[in-house]
């Protein structure tokens, strides 16, 4: 069992995308997702794909890393594509064979859905995970949500919990791998046998993992208390987020992209998709 | 005869990512049957990586691992056999404890081997005594033990599998001096009784001199010296150059010989005491 940790992992770099304000990145990522779902014709899809390729170029991240991020969901993409090919009905079948009828609409839908899922994954990971450290991300999120603290929602505490959780994901993965290796060295077998046997085989991993996670949490709490941490009240920040001209230009570009997508849908409606 | 043979091993962590680390470079190694082999080298020189290649926890990027005459990656399905032949105690192995009692935890390995109950019990008791575990802790929870006791329980868990090669990654790190001698002495006793081969990774030159038949020195993913302790420690200046050291008594003996008292080649305290009392 090899763990794939490429998806959702920060890739260090110093590109335009890396330097953008995390708040701007979070908001534009959401806008971009909406735009992906707005695209309904070949032309607007092409524009979205082009924008994603541009993002990739801006980020300076190797396409190989992106491909590795897509690999775990290839099955999902293929599955939805196949469903579309076989079950979408149109007017005139392209191929007819026994009970199977494949319509051109099905093929177009399948292609668009596949592109949509890939673009969705690639763009969100480019905006957020690959170019923004988890810490910057939760910082940005906290400030975006800070108006909610007016209605007594514990925004700071929530974002602190997020930060800590994100911070410890790689540690936990590393630890799981270490424990698995130690148990494998004692002949543990995780890959054969029925469901129950496999579930039982996880006990020697889960117990040490939980024990050390709780110990770690306890130690972290003590360390934070030793530094007089008492929560968000009256706390100032070390890194104050500041949006600059680059952020403004980037945000405008993303908004303009949305407008272009809508216009293309209306005025260049080749291969327009109807369903979903 | 060689029990472990590494041929042209290269190992790269995270190959094909920006975090690529070339941890082992063209490593060839032969470990003789029935010997205690010591593996030394500065931090990050690839000792732990090498150790995990021998029982197939890691797969070499390039090269062959021959264990007891079998190329372990020839039939990847049978890799578990390599785990039983080469028992590895990982660095800081305390985190591997999980069972309700120490006894059950030590029995985990033998159980995975499919041994009968009687044999398992026998092996557990034997392993516990080699690792220096007090019989009174056997029915306690492994999580209630002290650090040193946990270490011994983890050691016993691998010893109980009675592997042909026992491989220990810094078994004595963090133990008190008495515990250190006890654990290493127990290993030597185990080796004599069972007649298996042992590979020990350690940063302590004293331990190497006291317990090993042969020493392998690594730096920067490469093996730079192999030989008996006297051959290795005779290359005092080379070792210092690599950021390593020689046993302290060797330095004392060198200082004495500069002052006209020649003890010859001295690597262990016991031998130094013998030589000095001859002179007195
Ligand atoms: N899981 C891993 N992922 C990536 N790189 C690793 C991993 N484990 C070790 N390395 C790298 O491989 C190299 C060799 O590490 P290794 O753990 O084998 O050293 P070592 O000789 O055991 O050191 P020490 O004496 O500190 O235990 C180091 O540069 C280390 O950073
Ligand atoms: Mg190590």
Image (cartoon, coloured by chain):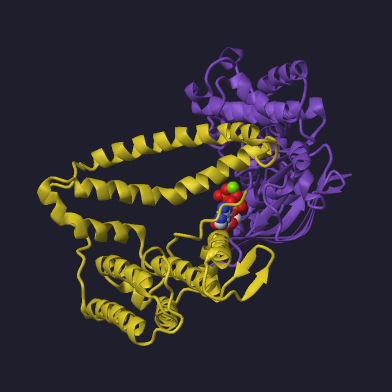
Residue that appears at 20% across and 59% down: A143
Residue lying at 80% horizontally and 49% vertically, measured from the top left: B72
Q: Which chain can be seen in yellow?
A: A
Q: Is residue B160 visible?
A: no
The structure residue drawn at horizontal position 35% and vertical position 35%, both measured from the top left corner, is A218
Task: Looking at this view, name the residue that lies furthest to the bottom.
Answer: A267
Residue B180 on image: x %, y %? 59, 30
**Residue B25 sits above or below residue B107 on the image:** below
Q: Nearer the viewer, residue B200 or B113?
A: B113
Does residue A211 appear to the left or right of A149 in the view shown? Answer: right
Residue B274 coordinates in the image, percent (x, y): 72, 30
Q: Which of these two is toward me, A81 or B207?
A: A81
Q: Which chain has been coloured purple in this picture?
A: B
Q: Residue furthest right?
A: B1
**Residue A222, relative to residue A21: is it above or below?**
above
Residue A235, percent across and down?
Answer: 15, 51
- Where does the image place residue A179, in percent across and percent down from the top left? 56, 40
Relative to B52, is B196 above or below? above
Residue at x-position 53% and y-position 43%? A176
User: Can you tell which quarter of the image residue B192 is in?
Assistant: top right
**How many numbered discs, if any?**
0
Depth check: A195 or B151 in front?
Answer: A195
Image quarter hosting the C terminus of chain A:
bottom left
* Direction from residue B132 to residue A14 in the image, left or right: left
Res B185 → quadrant: top right
Question: From where the camera sits, is residue B232 visible?
Answer: yes
């Amino acid at each position: 069992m090899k763990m794939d940790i490429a998806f959702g992992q920060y890739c260090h770099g110093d590109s335009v995308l890396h330097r953008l304000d995390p708040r701007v990145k979070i908001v534009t990522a959401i806008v971009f997702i909406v735009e992906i779902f707005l695209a309904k014709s070949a032309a607007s899809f092409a524009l979205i794909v082009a924008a994603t390729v541009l993002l990739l170029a801006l980020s300076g991240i190797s396409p190989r890393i992106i491909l590795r991020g897509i690999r775990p969901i290839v099955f999902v993409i293929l599955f939805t594509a196949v469903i579309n090919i076989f079950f979408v009905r149109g007017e005139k079948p392209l191929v007819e064979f026994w009970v199977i009828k494949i319509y051109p609409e099905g093929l177009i839908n399948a292609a668009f859905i596949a592109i949509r899922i890939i673009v969705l994954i690639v763009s969100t990971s480019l905006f957020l995970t690959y170019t923004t450290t988890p810490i910057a991300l939760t910082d940005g999120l906290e400030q975006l949500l800070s108006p909610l603290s007016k209605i007594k929602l514990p925004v700071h505490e929530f974002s602190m919990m997020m930060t800590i959780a994100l911070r410890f994901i790689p540690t936990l993965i590393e630890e799981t791998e270490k424990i698995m290796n130690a148990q494998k060295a004692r002949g543990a077998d995780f890959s054969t046998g029925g469901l129950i046997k496999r579930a039982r085989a996880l006990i020697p991993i889960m117990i040490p993992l939980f024990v050390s996670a709780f110990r770690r949490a306890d130690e972290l709490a003590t360390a934070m208390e030793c530094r007089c941490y008492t929560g968000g009240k009256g706390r100032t920040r070390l890194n104050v987020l500041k949006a600059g001209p680059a952020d403004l230009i980037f945000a405008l570009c993303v908004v303009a992209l949305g407008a272009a997508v809508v216009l293309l849908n209306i005025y260049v409606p080749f291969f327009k998709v109807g369903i979903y | 005869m060689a029990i472990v043979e590494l041929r042209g091993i290269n190992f790269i962590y995270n190959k094909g990512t920006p975090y690529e680390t070339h941890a082992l470079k063209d490593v060839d190694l032969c470990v003789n049957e029935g010997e205690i082999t010591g593996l030394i080298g500065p931090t990050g020189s690839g000792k732990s990586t090498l150790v995990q290649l021998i029982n197939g926890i890691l797969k070499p990027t390039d090269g062959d691992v021959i264990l007891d005459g079998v190329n372990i990656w020839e039939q990847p399905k049978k890799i578990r056999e390599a785990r039983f032949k080469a028992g590895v105690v990982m660095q800081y192995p305390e985190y591997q404890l999980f069972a309700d009692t120490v006894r059950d935890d030590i029995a985990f390995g033998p159980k995975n081997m499919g041994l009968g109950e009687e044999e398992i019990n026998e092996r557990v008791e034997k392993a516990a005594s080699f690792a220096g575990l007090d019989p009174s802790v056997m029915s306690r929870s492994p999580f209630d033990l002290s650090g040193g006791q946990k270490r011994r329980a983890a050691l016993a868990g691998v010893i109980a599998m009675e592997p042909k090669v026992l491989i220990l990654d810094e078994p004595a790190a963090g133990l008190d001096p008495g515990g250190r001698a006890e654990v290493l002495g127990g290993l030597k006793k185990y080796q004599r009784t069972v007649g298996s081969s042992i590979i020990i990774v350690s940063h302590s030159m004293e331990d190497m001199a006291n317990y090993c038949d042969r020493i392998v020195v690594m730096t920067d993913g490469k093996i730079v010296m192999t030989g008996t302790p006297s051959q290795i420690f005779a290359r005092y200046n080379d070792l210092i150059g690599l950021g390593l050291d020689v046993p302290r008594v060797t330095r004392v003996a060198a200082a004495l010989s500069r002052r006209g008292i020649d003890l010859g080649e001295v690597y262990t305290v016991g031998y130094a005491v013998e030589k000095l009392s001859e002179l007195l």
